[in-house]
Amino acid sequence: MPRVQLGPTTHRPSPLVLRWAKSFPQWGIQRILDLGAGNLRNSLYLADLGFSLWAADLPAQLARLGANLPPVPLLDTRLLQRTRLNMDLVLCTYVINILPPKEQSSLLALARRNLKRGGYLCLEVRRKNNSASLNALTPSELAAVVEPWGFRPAALEEGPAWLGMLFYCGRKMNIE
């Protein structure tokens, strides 16, 4: 299993990123914004694969990364309110499901603003199953949060405890 090193800690990329990254070039994805990048596990992995990548998070989270700055550009999410990065993909893992509705809207506005037309939004969340799960969603619940922002489902994959959905922004692109 691939791992990335940041300081003294080793991190694994998310299951969905591990599964879908090999298909990103076929889907026309080269420029990626990791929104809510956290410990940079996905950012570093995707950068190692050769993707052009920016990692964005709240200032407090970026400060936690310490003095050893990683080999990927870091962005304060507040700057994304004034940018139009025209990214192919905005990746957001285990973030939208822990936010209250108002903050979900803010995150989706940032994603849409910084995606190119025809770009993708990739969300990975905790999957709701038969037992009650805190901060977990079904595919229809996740789609209901995202679709009012003009995103349409393009792909879906579920693991034992995770749910991944790829949404397109604007014109539909063929995903196989």
Image (spheres, rainbow, N blue to C red):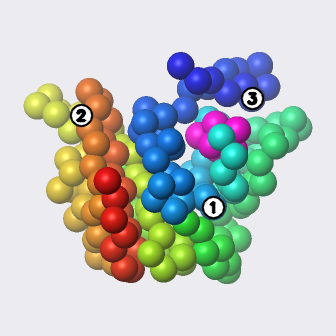
Q: CA distance from mark 2 to mark 1?
A: 33 Å
Sequence order check, earlier mark of 2 and 3:
3
Q: Quadrant of residue 116?
A: bottom right
Residue 115 lies within the magenta run = no
Along the horizontal axis of the image, is 117 left or right of 173? right
Residue at left 72%, top 25%?
A: 5
- Label 1: state its secondary structure: strand
Residue at left 88%, top 38%?
A: 67
Question: Residue 172: image x %, image y %?
Answer: 33, 74
| Placement of 131 over or under 73, stated as above or below | above
Q: Which residue is mark 3?
A: 6
Magenta-drawn segment: 42-48
Q: Residues within 10 Å of mark 3 (few under 14, many from 20)?
A: some
Out of 103 and 109, give the one closest to the viewer. Answer: 109
- Label 3: state its secondary structure: strand
Sequence order check, earlier mark of 3 and 1:
3
Q: Nearer the viewer, mark 3 or mark 1?
A: 1
Q: Which residue is mark 2?
A: 133
